[in-house]
Amino acid sequence: MIKLLNVRKGFNLGRPNEFVAVDGVTLSMEANRVTVLKGPSGSGKTTLLSLIGCMARPTSGRIILQRGLPREYLFPNGGDTTEVEVTSLPERFLTEIRRRTFGFIFQQFNLLKGITVLENVMLPAFPLGEKHGVVKKRALALLEMFGLSGRALAKVEWLSGGEAQRVAIARALMNNPPVIIADEPTAHLDSKLSSAFMEIIARLKDQGKTAIIASHDPLVFEAKMVDRVISVRDGMLEGDTA
Amino acid sequence: MARWIEKYRSILDFTLSSLVRRKGKNLSLLVVYVLVVFMLGSAMFLTEAMKREASLVLKGAPEMVIQRLLQGRYDPIPMSYLEKIRGIRGVISAEPRLWGYIYDSAIGANYTLMVPRNVALPSGEIMIGNGISRRRMIYSKDMMSFNLSNGSSRVFTVRDVISPESELVSADLVLLSEGDFREIFELPSTHATDLVVKIRNPKELVTVAKKVMELLPDTRPIIRDEMVRTYDSVFDWRGGIVTVLLMMALLAFVILAWEKASGLSADEKREIGILKAIGWETSDVIAVKAYEGLLISFFSFTVGILLAYGHVFFFSAALFAPAMKGWSVLYPDFRITPFVDPYQVAVLFFLTVVPYTVATIVPSWRAAIVDPDSVMRS
Amino acid sequence: MNRQIPPKKNGGSRFPARKSRPCLFLLGAGVLLLGLIFTHAHVRRHSDISSIHRLATVVEKLELTDLALFTEARYTRHPSQADLYSAFQDHPTSLEHFPMGSIAAPSAALRRLHGKVD
């Protein structure tokens, strides 16, 4: 469903501090699978993740989203192919595809301080212009699902680490994306919470979601619900269990 | 359309949550901002209203006053000039005016003594302005004495107090008979203070004024338009205290704008990065900042203007009274009629709302065009 | 740890209403009040105009030339009658040493007309 063809991403090109984070990666990933990108820090797995998630454009190479994604996500305004090359899309469409296709969970959770849990979860839906009542109901349902109903009106800085993590997941699921992308989600969690996180990922997989996780935590890449582990080093693929 | 409204309303919701977060900072900003608008608005309302009122009131002023200049100051004018002026073509009448100032050491105030040509007052009786009456607590039938030029003093009976309604023009007036006036100042009957001239055709005013100056080179004609224009410039918004206020306000704005434009805090930048990462477009982020700027400046403007309006027109510009009164002992008690110039209000609106909003948007613009993956990289 | 939030009154929902609602309400109220300023000004001008006309009548009857606003000195009591060389007109742009001078600028109109005479 997601194909990368000879993708390369460099930073500060042409300057003395230039470096290539992703160097000629060709990869294809299936829908409804849990894939882990494994590698030491600085291996380029985060960059690879942001390329897959349409957050950044590759310096060269192509990224193609294809069949397996519901059509209405790819072509909200109608379209006649089921394959779209995201690398050539203008910024506006890229944002549109990104927010309908991917839900992101960041290493630091990146919740907005000072506003409530509920508002944090609702945030990704705001630019879509859905009815406020509908958005709120969906956000509350998500919080309910993660056992956070009682915390809806709490400010995020009052949350425990585990709660913050679940709020971050709820926010990632807000626009009901088919793909969840997580960058080092367990980096700030103890073993118990890390396992809990993987349980949630398993649940989401059962619901038909696809998960792509970058991690060097054995608790993640050794978990039983993981379908495929791809090792990355120095911006290149090193190993693949698939 | 509904979607579009819902989107921007949701963004407004978020903006408000975001503003509430920095309650202290935004409230103090609002207070400073309201104060600036209040001061500027008050000065603007006051000067505009006084200017317009003066021009309406002075419509009744003499068409032309002729003074005599001696050693660069005005001096009693010989009555013999009257005939020469009456001979000028276009002049209907020329009459002497008798008025002068007298200092009352009892309250340390200056009064304007004046002989009304249209009111016959018997010798020994005066009419006083309500300002004097209030200040000296002298009323109808009371006695009041003045020091004469020769050192002796004379007692007068107050015949009446001039209607308080006309205080704006009569607060410090003492009306008396011609004989008493000449006695107090030892002014010989060959001279008057100045002359008032009536002219057949108002268009000929300037021509007549020129003729007077040709005929009587030591005189200085003052036409009614100039009197009105004097108040135009006295209450010019570019003049005096308004300029000082404007400077202060501008300075405050520069400081605010500088504080804003010198960049967002690391926290704010991170937040913008997060919003971008969860799917907000650059324009959505800028909309938040635009709302922020517009809300703060609009509410400051509205509250400031409302307070200024109340201050000037309900409380007679009480805060400016010390400056208006200056060292005057007598000050008229009057209600300011609200002449409001919508153009000036609009100018103040744009001067306050636009720069602040721009200063809010511009720095966030730079932050908002970051790549959405920046939060992942940091 | 889970602190239960007590139910709020609005519509039985325990969640506060959207923040934009009071904000939009206040915005509307602000615009309305600004409009009210002009209405109030209009109404009061209407009721004051007759007393202003009466003032003009007094001015006409007594042949007055100035407002009795600043009584501190002769050239501030009658700025339109002040001679060209009195203080406050020492220099065309000087500010007067009396406090009222911070409000009143020298009259440009006077200076202009009498440029010929000086």
Image (spheres, rainbow, N blue to C red):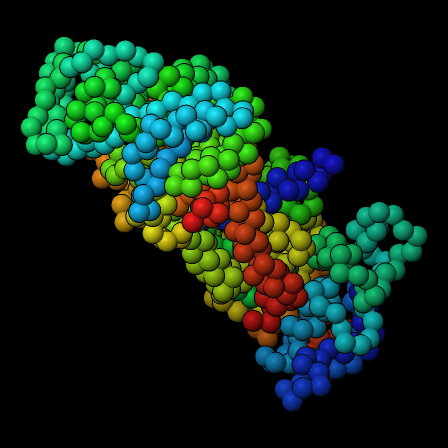
Residue A113 in view here: yes
Q: Nearer the viewer, residue A53 or A32?
A: A53
Residue placed at 73% from the left, 64% from the top?
A: A54
Residue A93 vertical position relative to residue A88 in the rendered view, above or below:
above
- The extreme bottom residue here reads A16
Q: For the point 49% across and 20% down, which residue is it?
A: B92
Asked if residue B51 is positioned above or below residue C43 in the image, the reply reads below
Q: Position of residue C93 (x, y in %)?
A: 40, 53
Q: Residue furthest right?
A: A80
Q: Position of residue A59 (x, y in %)?
A: 76, 76
Q: Is residue B334 left or right of residue B23?
A: left
Q: Position of residue B300 (x, y in %)?
A: 46, 41
Residue drawn at the location 34% of the way across and 13% of the way down: B118
For the image, the number of numbered tags is 0
Look at the picture and state if A166 lies above or below A119.
Answer: below
Task: Give residue B172's position: percent from left, percent from top.
Answer: 25, 26
